[in-house]
Image (cartoon, rainbow, N blue to C red):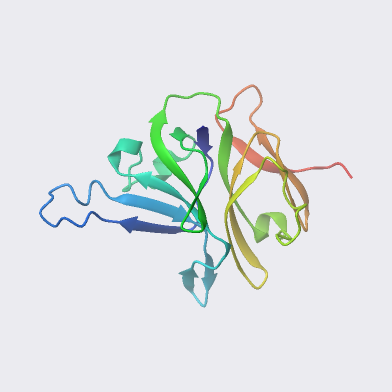
Amino acid sequence: MLVKIGGFGSVWSVRVRRDENDSRRFACSTYYNTTGIVINGKLRRRWTSGGDVRFSGPRSGFDQNYPDKALGRTFECFEPEIWQGHRRVTVRRQVKAMKPDCYLVVTDDKQTGGVAAESSAWKSNDTVLLSLSQWNEHQEILLLMPAYSWVRGRLGTFYLEPQTNRFDAAALHLSHLS
């Protein structure tokens, strides 16, 4: 599956190799990205639906020192799976620009007005929820979305629209249809 990285959740974590004698233990660490909410000035993971994106060291083409360099790039990924009760997408490697199967999208209550995640009608059937963190009315949501799929928030329905005649980038746009 080809995934274009459109955004990341707020929370990053790392798993470092255990072998203290391995000179590459930090370079070959595994990085995880998921959603979070700021509560009393601290970023916290408050999953109502847990999951993450996993980047395995330099093999994946992900530079942990500059994660924003992955934005707008396409990665070959394994299909989403359930790992220890949570949804996970594992990145295999970066690929040259190709039309992606879906986009990694992050949205929040400021953009959508918040989604009613307890309802089954808040997202299109082809949209995969990776992670949703929520505290009171605040939300951050990490999704895998094919082009032209949608999410429905309190402010309306937002469609994921690729740039015209290009699939380099896509953004959620509020539908003006009633």
Task: Give the residue at x 42% y 40%.
Answer: 91
Single out the residue that lies furthest toward the left. 21
Residue 73 location (% of width, % of height): 46, 34
Single out the residue that lies furthest toward the right. 178
Q: Is residue 170 left or right of residue 62?
A: right
Q: Is residue 176 left or right of residue 117?
A: right
Residue 162 location (% of width, % of height): 64, 32
Task: Give the residue at x 71% y 43%.
Answer: 125
Residue 66 location (% of width, % of height): 35, 46
Residue 31 location (% of width, % of height): 36, 51
Task: Give the residue at x 70% y 35%.
Answer: 148
The answer to which of 91 and 79 lies nearer the viewer is 79
The answer to which of 114 and 55 lies nearer the viewer is 55
Looking at the image, residue 51 lies above or below residue 169: below
Looking at the image, residue 29 lies above or below residue 77: below
The number of numbered discs placed on residues in the rendered structure image is 0
Q: Quadrant of residue 119?
A: bottom right
Task: Give the residue at x 64% y 35%.
Answer: 146
The answer to which of 152 and 161 lies nearer the viewer is 152
Could you tell me which quadrant the C terminus lies in?
A: top right
Q: Is residue 68 left or right of residue 120?
A: left
Q: Quadrant of residue 153?
A: bottom right
